[in-house]
Amino acid sequence: MIIRSDLSWTKSSYSDGGNNCVEVAHGGSGVMPVRDSKRPDPVIVVGGHTWTAFVSGVKSGDVA
């Protein structure tokens, strides 16, 4: 999958503000690109439903 170069990346609100930042971008087509801010390549692409389940798990404390 080719990731568009014009994506707008957003740091996670759970990142500590230092070098441990996860960034996400809305990739369209039901996918969520995810990357490490200090090492932006490679990008991991997660399905939209999988991303939603992951975020719900983090918010509920089921995923640490």
Image (cartoon, rainbow, N blue to C red):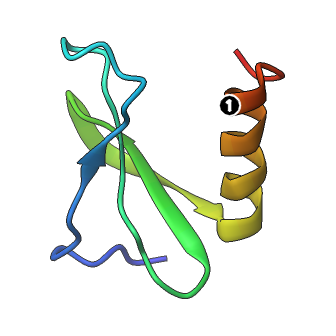
Residue drawn at point x = 20 percent, y = 65 percent: 8
**Residue 26 point in image, percent of width and height:** 40, 70
Mark 1 residue type: Lys
Q: Nearer the viewer, residue 57 or 20?
A: 57
Q: Quadrant of the C terminus?
A: top right
Q: Secondary structure at mark 1?
A: helix
**Residue 49 point in image, percent of width and height:** 76, 66
Residue drawn at point x = 23 percent, y = 71 percent: 7
Which residue is situated farthest in the bottom direction here? 29
* Quarter location, residue 60: top right
Q: Nearer the viewer, residue 36 or 21?
A: 21
Q: Nearer the viewer, residue 13 or 35?
A: 13
**Residue 57 point in image, percent of width and height:** 78, 34
Residue of label 1: 59
Which residue is situated farthest in the right direction here? 62
Residue drawn at point x = 42 percent, y = 75 percent: 27
* In this view, 5 is above or below 54: below
* In this view, 44 is above or below 57: below
Q: Nearer the viewer, residue 20 or 59?
A: 59
From the viewer's perspective, tell me whether residue 62 is left or right of residue 45: right
